[in-house]
């Protein structure tokens, strides 16, 4: 009898060991797979069972959370949604996250290890901390000036503090309210379909995700390359460039819209925006020299994030001389984001040093304690200080005496460069209007802001666009807001 009891006990013990082994297999070895299984609703329910941390502009939160009383309890809300959508992105229970909501999701959702009171606390307790907050570098007044300046027209504005790389404004127009995507149900799916069908593409962040031919604003990069390489030693000396200019190896002539470009100096070519001089200088610098120069400004960089990913600005690595000539005036395959062109203006204003652009000032826990600072490290030296000084004077001349007079601010040293970018089949599309600029704080003598503006649907004659008619007034309003801050 005792022998049977022992056998039964041994069998029960074996069953218990098997049960424990299976539990360990499920809870330890297969935990990640089960957690990631789309059929597992527990992870999704847990994600929305507490309020999400907030994104702040200055001291004001531009996001919030509301308790819906549903199974997915807390839903994202947005204050001034269209104004800040290019900064925040959306956090949707149906479609996931984008932009800053995506890049800082672990902080905002409370899953980031740095939010835990002790190391490995979350691994041991399997608990989640209250969502942390993300404090941005954006200046509300500068953001509003850019948004109102575009006035719903298709385009974008990026503004930087040249001395720190802080992004002061990031605007894309037309915009949308990310709050319409926050929850679930037919209203959300209908809004998603409507936004994605729209020909205006309101969900496209034109400031960092859309690239455009930069047109004549790129001539600042070519000028920096020519000065650094010693191709131009005296910016005020005549060049040997004819007008029109025959593209190397072809019978195609490149004309000038401006007058007085025959043998014009570099300074004059920047002031009135001569295509011929700048195209010829690009060829003289050569492909290798131009690639080195554009790389220092941030072109051809696939790894730039702010922390949202920024689209790559392009300058082709393999070109014939005639293609290089066109690329050197911001045409052919040369493309840039508005943020990239703000970086160009920023480097000139900051004495040749390009600070890495960043959108996050600091990250805090729910109680407001700082757990991480933003990335303000130096990015790279874009040009020699002497080159930057010469370009500053040339860009000031553009605003005071050239094509950028609409950007002038009384009592303030302002530098700028207009641009008109041709696009479409045989350049049949309406030209994009560009303006890049910087303003110096008259009280401190340091650069206060660098700005890039692009207007896609500029309803103006080309002469008005090249004179800064569409984009320069927007840049001026943004610079004024930054100077008043």
Image: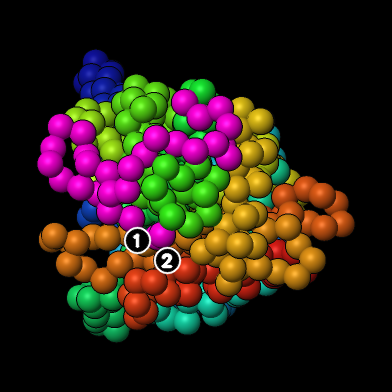
Residue 478 or residue 55, whichever sits in front: 478
- Give the residue at mark 1: 257
**Neighbours of disc 1 within 10 Å: few (<14), some (14-19), many (20+):** some
Q: Position of residue 281 (x, y in %)?
A: 39, 34
Badge number at residue 466: 2
Task: Residue 34: name its quadrant.
Answer: top left
Total marks drawn? 2
Q: Tell whether 461 sits left or right of 106.
A: left
Task: Decide if residue 378 is in sight here.
Answer: no
213 in relation to 357, above or below: below
Distance from the alpha carbon under mark 1 to that under mark 2: 9 Å
Q: Position of residue 76 (x, y in %)?
A: 48, 71
What residue is at 66 percent from the left and 30 percent from the top?
386
The magenta stretch spans residue 125: no
**Neighbours of disc 2 within 10 Å: few (<14), some (14-19), many (20+):** many
The span picked out in magenta is 231-259
What residue is at 41 percent from the left and 59 percent from the top?
259
Q: Position of residue 106 (x, y in %)?
A: 50, 47
246 in relation to 482, above or below: above
Q: Tell whether 479 sits left or right of 200.
A: right
The magenta stretch spans residue 255: yes
What residue is at 76 percent from the left and 62 percent from the top?
412
What SS does tag 1 mark? loop
Q: Colour mode?
A: rainbow
Q: Position of residue 127 (x, y in %)?
A: 55, 46
Q: Tell whether 135 sits left or right of 382.
A: right
Task: Residue 177: name its quadrant.
Answer: bottom left
Assess whether mark 2 and mark 1 are in contact (beta carbons under 8 angstroms).
yes
Badge number at residue 342: none
Task: Classify the position of the N terminus by image quarter.
Answer: top left
């Amino acid at each position: 009898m005792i022998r049977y009891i022992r056998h039964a006990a041994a069998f029960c013990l074996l069953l218990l060991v098997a049960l424990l082994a299976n539990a360990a297999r499920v809870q330890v070895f297969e935990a990640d797979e089960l957690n990631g299984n789309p059929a597992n609703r527990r992870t999704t329910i847990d994600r929305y069972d507490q309020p999400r941390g907030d994104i702040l502009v200055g001291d004001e939160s531009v996001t919030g959370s509301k308790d819906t009383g549903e199974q997915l309890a807390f839903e994202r809300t947005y204050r001034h949604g269209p104004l800040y959508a290019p900064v925040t992105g959306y956090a949707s229970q149906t479609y996931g996250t984008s932009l800053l909501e995506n890049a800082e999701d672990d902080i905002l959702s409370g899953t980031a290890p740095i939010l835990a009171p002790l190391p490995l606390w979350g691994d041991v307790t399997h608990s989640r901390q209250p969502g942390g907050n993300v404090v941005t570098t954006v200046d509300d007044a500068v953001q509003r000036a850019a948004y109102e300046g575009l006035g719903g027209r298709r385009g974008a504005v990026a503004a930087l503090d040249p001395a720190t790389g802080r992004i002061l404004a990031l605007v894309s127009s037309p915009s949308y309210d990310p709050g319409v995507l926050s929850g679930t149900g037919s209203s959300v799916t209908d809004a998603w379909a409507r936004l994605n069908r729209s020909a205006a593409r309101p969900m496209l962040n034109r400031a960092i995700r859309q690239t455009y031919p930069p047109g004549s604003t790129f001539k600042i990069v070519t000028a920096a390359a020519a000065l650094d390489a010693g191709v131009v030693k005296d910016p005020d000396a005549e060049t040997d460039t004819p007008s029109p200019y025959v593209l190397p190896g072809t019978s195609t002539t490149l004309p000038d819209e401006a007058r007085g470009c025959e043998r014009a100096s570099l300074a004059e070519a920047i002031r009135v925006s001569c295509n011929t001089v700048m195209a010829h200088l690009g060829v003289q610098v050569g492909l290798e020299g131009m690639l080195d120069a554009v790389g220092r400004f941030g072109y051809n960089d696939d790894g730039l994030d702010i922390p949202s990913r920024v689209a790559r600005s392009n300058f082709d690595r393999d070109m014939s001389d005639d293609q290089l000539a066109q690329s050197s005036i911001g045409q052919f395959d040369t493309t840039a984001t508005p943020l990239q062109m703000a970086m160009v203006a920023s480097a000139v204003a900051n004495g040749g040093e390009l600070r890495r652009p960043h959108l996050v000032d600091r990250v805090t826990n729910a109680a407001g304690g700082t757990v991480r600072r933003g990335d303000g490290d130096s990015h790279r030296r874009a040009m020699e200080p002497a080159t930057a000084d010469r370009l500053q004077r040339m860009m000031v001349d553009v605003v005071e005496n050239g094509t950028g007079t609409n950007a002038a601010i009384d009592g303030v040293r302002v530098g700028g460069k207009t641009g008109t970018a041709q696009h479409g089949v045989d350049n049949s599309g309406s030209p994009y209007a560009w303006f890049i600029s910087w303003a110096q704080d008259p009280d401190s003598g340091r650069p206060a802001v660098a700005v890039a503006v692009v207007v896609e649907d500029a309803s103006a004659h080309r002469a008005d666009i090249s004179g800064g008619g569409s984009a320069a007034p927007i840049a001026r309003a943004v610079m004024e807001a930054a100077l008043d801050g």
